[in-house]
Image: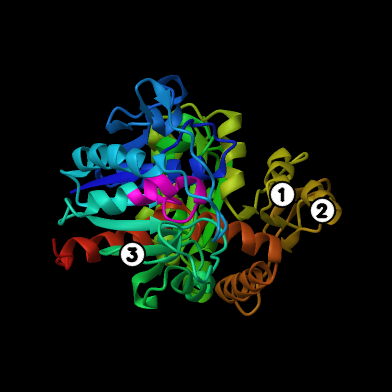
Amino acid sequence: MKIAILTMFNGLSNTYSLVNVVSEQLKMLLADNVSVKMLVSEHCPDFERVGVFADSRIEWIKIVNSINGKQFNWKTYNKVDDEIEDKIYQEADIIAIDLIFALRDVDICFMHDILYQGVHLVHNLAVRKAQKQLPFVKFVAFTHSAPVIMKNASYPISCMFSAMPNTTFIYPTKCGLPALARQYNCDIDSCYSINNSIDILQGMTEEVVNISHHIKFYEKEILIVYAGRMNMAKRFHVIAEFAGFIKVYAHKSVGIVFCDFASSDIDSEMYKRIIISQGEKAGLSKDDIVFTSDCGYKYGVKRETVYNLFSLSNLYICPSYSESFGLTVIEAISKGNFVVLNEAVPALKEIGDNIGAYFMRWSAKTYDGESYENYQPSEQAYYAENAIKIISLMDNNPVIKSKTLARMRYSNEWVYNNQMKPLIKKLTKTKNKYML
């Protein structure tokens, strides 16, 4: 399968929001090993191909934008009575020839604002003309601004307000679909919503990208990140166990990233087995836990990587036996995490009081010796009760809820798997009804 993306960009600066939308769509398609063509204006400079645009798998096609060395002047048409320049028909014919050649081997052509924007009326005409020679190509027309209705528009301006055969009309939100159908005078069944999305790993370290291959961040409703030396006093195993209670009793998908490094106190591999065992007994699967030392970072990850991971996570748990301050607590909450601390540790109690943390109690080393907890009726009941309470507070915290949804619901992966890919499958299975 091959998909073309028709934009007629004259440049690729990411200050233009549509460039960002297209770049995310490219990432989605390339991640699924879809062959992709980018159709842009012949005057779109090659040196601006950075980021995903520099991916060698993209086939670039430059569509004609000049005649006899003179660049086309795209006039913007936005009124019914706008005077039509005679040259638009000649230019559309020339562009159509290029489009026929460029699209002859593709299955689907994504068009971005080609039908919507008056500045692209010449390309609108060209696509409609080319389509008559491309009976097997399905077209998908993305509209990125509020739909408008213009009555009594005559040809060719009417092309901005009429349906095109074998075309699915896309709007980024469902609420706009009825208006979209009215603009193009098409059946609402021909309209479909595909949200704009974000690359949740954009700008993060290579280490984070590598770690993402070991855990699907966008699938985890609760994502816990914990950094520290592999020492039983840091209680990695307690976090794994409590996370299992969250998964079972609060009915949430859970993922843990342990940013670990070796300690002389205990063999790291043996402690990992203990941690995984504790988590599995409480309800986690082995795949819910990732150790960065197993991702190729035996001696720990960069501090920047921990910050990046905290920006993705939403729950930080510190059941540590002893702390003099707990810097990662501040780092975690500064990145919008719900923080759970061991109230029995004096330093954590002081910090927690200052930042409004949620407290639980585990045995601890205090300035007066050691404290021990006696859970009633049982430690399991205590964990279950607090797991439910914590998740309720997180679900009702608008900041944490929004952060979580941005990572999950509006990630490239969610949008592609739940909106774009199903549409692609539907289109490739449907026979083209367009008759020459």
N-term mark: 3 or 2: 3
Magenta-drawn stretch contains 156: no
Q: Amino acid at mark 2?
A: Ile
Magenta-drawn stretch contains 120: yes
N-term mark: 1 or 3: 3
Vertical relation: 182 (above or below) 51: below
Per the image, the residue denoted by label 3 is 168
The numbered disc on residue 355 is 2
For the record, the magenta segment spans 112-125
Asked if the residue at tag 2 contacts the one at tag 1, i.e. Cβ–Cβ closer than 8 Å, the answer is yes
Asked if the residue at tag 3 contacts the one at tag 1, i.e. Cβ–Cβ closer than 8 Å, the answer is no
Q: Amino acid at mark 1?
A: Ile
Q: Which structural element holds mark 3?
A: strand
- C-alpha span from label 3 to label 2: 50 Å
The answer to whether residue 70 shows anywhere in this view is: yes
Q: Residue at x 57, y 58 (%)?
A: 79
Q: Residues within 10 Å of mark 3 (few under 14, many from 20)?
A: many
- C-alpha span from label 1 to label 2: 8 Å
Please state the horizontal and vertical placement of residue 226, each as a whole percent of the image. Answer: 57, 45
Please state the horizontal and vertical placement of residue 96, each as a whole percent of the image. Answer: 27, 42
Q: Amino acid at mark 3?
A: Thr
